[in-house]
Image (cartoon, rainbow, N blue to C red):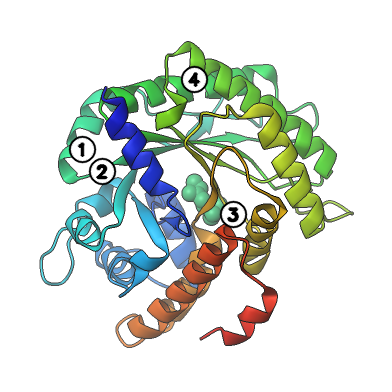
């Protein structure tokens, strides 16, 4: 492990005024997304869609890194350039999703544990050859009647620590993603409690495993009421609660924090990040690593006519990337949405 390499990569991932696009939808997830917009889930369609994202001109102004999926990191543009090579040429860091998905946790109905540790050392070595500089692992925590259990949080935190150690051993920055799901009717207070507990356990396990926080990025959900809650959270409530939890539970030495969008509306996710960055300066940069909140309009436009609409889809991608990049500086306002090119 070379801590300087890790620190350098982590710093670039959360460089001032930039954020990360998650384009690492697994086979199952991309099928779900394509089904929703009426596109056939073929390898060529997946390649063309991802190519549309990766080749958007000027994306590097707002985007520091893009997370790819196992299939995607092996794919090429029409002219035969491997995707990770294309990104490196633009100065965008290629990342890779390395977990094997959330599976049912034995003896714990309704809960999941993320798999993917077996053979991870070898897979990381291969991804490193492809040019991957950071690696994402997503754990899922569900809020419900009597959930989450300690067993679920412990099992996921332990797995995240083992994966992070393997990443750092390979000079790849771990992007640790414990996602507290937004599904359900829980209050923001309950989400606050569960997020605290999850982050506390995660960083305890990471520390015990010897993982260097200076070479680690946290990808977290925001503290927010469940989608079906009677009382929905305001922008101020989300920003204040999220920042409070992060200040209490995230080590100051951590290289940076990025958020997932988790089913929030596109503009809502931007507004939340913006508010947090307007509220003050923190020990770590606060940025984004959205999939849906950036890609929603992009995929819709592309799906209407993949070949003819590529430029329009890219305009939407650049616009949402710019709005979120401005939000990392606290310089976004909803007035700007009037300029939307879609
Ligand atoms: P969403 O922003 O759509 O939640 O996706 C982020 C992500 O990478 C989930 O693993």
- Cβ of mark 3 under 8 Å from ligand 1: the answer is yes
Tell me the residue at 25%/43% (across/down): 132
Work out how far the residue at label 3 is from the one at label 4, CA to CA, in angstroms.
24 Å
Residue 261 numbered tag: 3
Work out how far the residue at label 3 is from the one at label 2, CA to CA, in angstroms.
23 Å
Q: What element carries label 1?
A: helix
Residue occupied by mark 1: 128
Q: Is residue 288 above or below residue 304?
A: above
Q: In this view, does 34 lie above or below 220?
A: below
In the rendered structure, are the residues bearing label 4 and label 2 in contact, judged by CB atoms less than 8 Å apart?
Answer: no
Compare marks 3 and 4 and give the one earlier in the sequence.
4
In the rendered structure, are the residues bearing label 1 and label 2 in contact, judged by CB atoms less than 8 Å apart?
Answer: yes
**In the image shown, does 127 or 107 lie closer to the viewer?**
127
Q: What element carries label 3?
A: loop
Compare marks 4 and 2 and give the one earlier in the sequence.
2
Q: Where is residue 236 in the image (x, y as percent from the top left)?
A: 80, 55
Q: Where is residue 11 in the image (x, y as percent from the top left)?
A: 39, 43
Q: Is mark 4 on a helix, strand or loop?
A: helix
Q: Quadrant of residue 324?
A: bottom right
Residue occupied by mark 2: 132
Compare marks 3 and 1 and give the one earlier in the sequence.
1
Tell me the residue at 40%/72% (across/down): 39
């Amino acid at each position: 492990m070379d801590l300087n390499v890790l620190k350098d990569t982590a710093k670039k991932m959360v460089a001032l005024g930039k954020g990360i696009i998650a384009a690492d939808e697994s086979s199952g997830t991309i099928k779900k997304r394509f089904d929703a917009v009426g596109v056939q889930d073929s390898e060529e369609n997946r390649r063309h869609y991802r190519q549309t994202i990766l080749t958007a001109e000027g994306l590097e102004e707002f985007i520091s890194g893009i997370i790819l999926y196992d299939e995607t990191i092996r794919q090429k543009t029409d002219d035969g350039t491997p995707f990770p090579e294309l990104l490196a040429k633009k100065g965008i860091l290629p990342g890779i999703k390395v977990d094997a998905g959330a599976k049912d946790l034995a003896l714990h109905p309704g809960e999941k544990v993320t798999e993917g540790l077996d053979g991870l050392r070898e897979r990381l070595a291969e991804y490193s050859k492809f040019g991957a500089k950071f690696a994402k692992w997503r754990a899922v925590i569900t809020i419900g009647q009597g959930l989450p259990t300690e067993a679920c949080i412990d099992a996921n935190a332990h797995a995240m620590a083992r994966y992070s150690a393997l990443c750092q051993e390979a000079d790849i920055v771990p992007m640790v993603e414990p996602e507290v799901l937004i599904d359900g009717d829980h209050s923001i207070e309950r989400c606050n409690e569960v997020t605290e507990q999850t982050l506390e356990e995660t960083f305890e396990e990471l520390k015990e495993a010897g993982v260097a926080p200076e070479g680690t990025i946290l990808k977290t959900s925001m503290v927010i009421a469940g989608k079906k809650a009677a009382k929905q959270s305001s922008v101020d409530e989300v920003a204040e609660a999220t920042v409070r939890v992060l200040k209490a539970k995230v080590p100051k030495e951590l290289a940076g924090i990025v958020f997932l969008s988790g089913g929030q509306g596109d503009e809502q996710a931007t507004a939340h990040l913006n508010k947090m960055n307007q509220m003050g300066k923190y020990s770590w940069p606060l940025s984004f690593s959205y999939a849906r909140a950036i890609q929603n309009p992009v995929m819709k436009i592309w799906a209407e006519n993949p070949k003819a609409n590529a430029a329009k889809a890219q305009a939407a991608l650049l616009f949402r990337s710019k709005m979120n990049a401005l939000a990392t500086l606290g310089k976004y306002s909803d007035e700007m949405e009037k300029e939307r090119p879609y």
